[in-house]
Amino acid sequence: MFKALADPTRRKILDELAERDGQTLFEICSRLAMKYQLQSSRQAISQHLDTLAAAGLVSSRKDGRYKFHYLDTTPLQRLTERWHKEN
Amino acid sequence: MFKALADPTRRKILDELAERDGQTLFEICSRLAMKYQLQSSRQAISQHLDTLAAAGLVSSRKDGRYKFHYLDTTPLQRLTERWHKEN
DNA sequence: ATGATAGGCAAGCCGCCACTTGCCTATCAA
DNA sequence: TTGATAGGCAAGTGGCGGCTTGCCTATCAT
């Protein structure tokens, strides 16, 4: 999961899903292009979504020809607890 | 900072400093070798510490020929707040 | 003074990762 | 049914990151 968070484009995808959950691949692509002027290809974003899904940060639901992506922040909870100082 | 957390060896270094703060480079090397059987060279750990310092996760204090390294978890606080769901 | 200890600097190698490219399948509207 | 839309699969490429290698400086003990 740490490696999933290491890429700035993937973090922007999480930002986008945090702002508006349940977007499709094309929605994410166009909104990233709008906001951040990054012209990442559809395949690039798709692969990023695969990585985020493998990390458990994004889940998806398929409906017809659309596939909606949802943010899941529960893996981030454990992240904070790891290096807490005991003092 | 995310890239600093992406490497498993660097995360083990943070684990080590969380358990015993203020270690020198050689202490970290030997203890990592002990616990995790990873025979990373001194230079490798040194470069990892540089990365962690650049991310603001580790600070250091020099005293004589020793250089002590300290964990700083404050950058991790902001990490959690980023993708909280507002519902 | 000399060796041992603790660490730094810089160049080179290599594998992985992000991205592209090309083509394919599936669903929906006309 | 045909074209457009939404997405998937897989191979190839280039650059960056982790690590090594070699050599150097600084501090301390004897």
Image: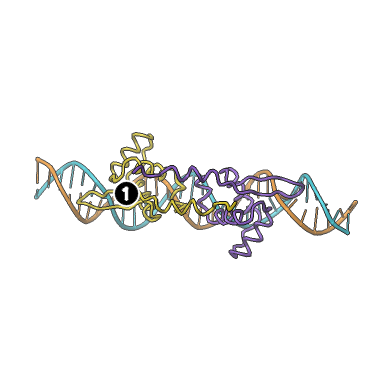
Chain colours: A yellow, B purple, C orange, D cyan
Q: Nearer the viewer, residue B50 or B15?
A: B15
Residue D5: image quadrant is: top left
Q: Hey, what amino acid is under mark 1? A: Tyr
Question: Would residue B84 be visible to someone looking at this image?
Answer: yes
Q: Residue at x 64, y 56 (%)?
A: B20
Label total for image: 1
Question: Would residue B51 be visible to someone looking at this image?
Answer: no
| Residue C19, percent from left and from top | 39, 44
Q: Residue at x 63, y 63 (%)?
A: B33
Assign a secondary structure to mark 1: strand
Q: Is residue C28 above or below residue B27?
A: above
Q: Residue at x 51, y 54 (%)?
A: A82
- Left or right: residue B43 versus residue D29 is left
Q: Chain of mark 1?
A: A
Q: Nearer the viewer, residue B78 or A36?
A: B78
| Residue A51, percent from left and from top | 39, 52
| Residue B80, percent from left and from top | 46, 46
Judge the density around disc 1: few (<14), some (14-19), many (≥20) Cα neighbours within 10 Å. Answer: many
Mark 1, residue position: A70
| Residue A8, percent from left and from top | 44, 43
Residue at the front extreme of this rendering: A87
Quarter of the picture holding the N terminus of chain A: bottom left
